[in-house]
Amino acid sequence: MRLNWFTLLAIFIGVVSISGCGDECSSYSKYSCKEIEKATYNAYFYYPSGKEEYLGVVTGLPNCGVKAHNFAASKNLTSNNEWSYICCMKAEGSECLEKHR
């Protein structure tokens, strides 16, 4: 079977547009944004000094941020410049497969 240039171009454009159909999270994770948002996480809080404190396990990335913000408020740390947090995705037998915020 012989394909003309127009057919080849149409196939190429189709392949390129299909390959770009992932969500924006696929650029930094093997999980979709929906999976990242709903995953289970170990939440870690970092004081201005850099000291780490484990906050526990949460379900859902938004809940991880809420837990960190509530913890900061309980310590009277009002500015995000004073503290930070990391959400470690629990997946595939790992306690910190990927880090998210």
Image (tube, rainbow, N blue to C red):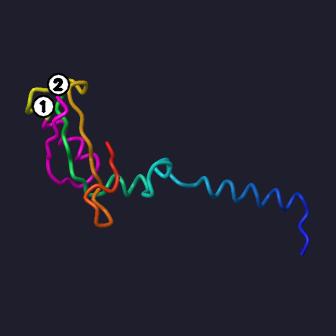
Asked if the magenta segment contains residue 11, the reply would be no
What is the tally of numbered marks visible in this picture? 2
Q: Which residue does the numbered mark 1 point to in the structure image? A: 73
Badge 2 local density, few (<14 within 10 Å), some, or many (20+)?
few
Q: Which residue does the numbered mark 2 point to in the structure image? A: 78
Could you say which disc has been placed on residue 36 in the image? none
Asked if the magenta segment contains residue 61, the reply would be yes
* Quadrant in which the N terminus is drawn: bottom right
Q: Earlier in the sequence, mark 2 or mark 1?
A: 1
Q: Residue at x 74, y 54 (%)?
A: 13
Would you identify the image quadrant in which residue 90 lies? bottom left
Estimate the spatial distance between the alpha carbons at disc 2 and disc 1, rounded to whole Å. 6 Å
Give the answer, above or below, for where 27 lies relative to 18.
above
The span picked out in magenta is 49-71
Instruction: Indicate the position of residue 20 as horizontal and vertical percent values.
Output: 60, 52
Give the answer, above or below, for where 1 lies relative to 8.
below
- Looking at the rendered structure, the kind of residue marked 1 is Ala
Q: Secondary structure at mark 1?
A: helix
Mark 2 vs 1: CB contact within 8 A: yes
Instruction: Indicate the position of residue 16 as horizontal and vertical percent values.
Output: 68, 54
- Looking at the rendered structure, the kind of residue marked 2 is Thr
Give the answer, above or below, for where 66 lies relative to 3.
above
Q: Residue at x 21, y 30 (%)?
A: 83
In this picture, residue 15 sits left or right of residue 40: right
Q: Secondary structure at mark 2?
A: loop
Query: 63 or 40, which lies in front?
Result: 40
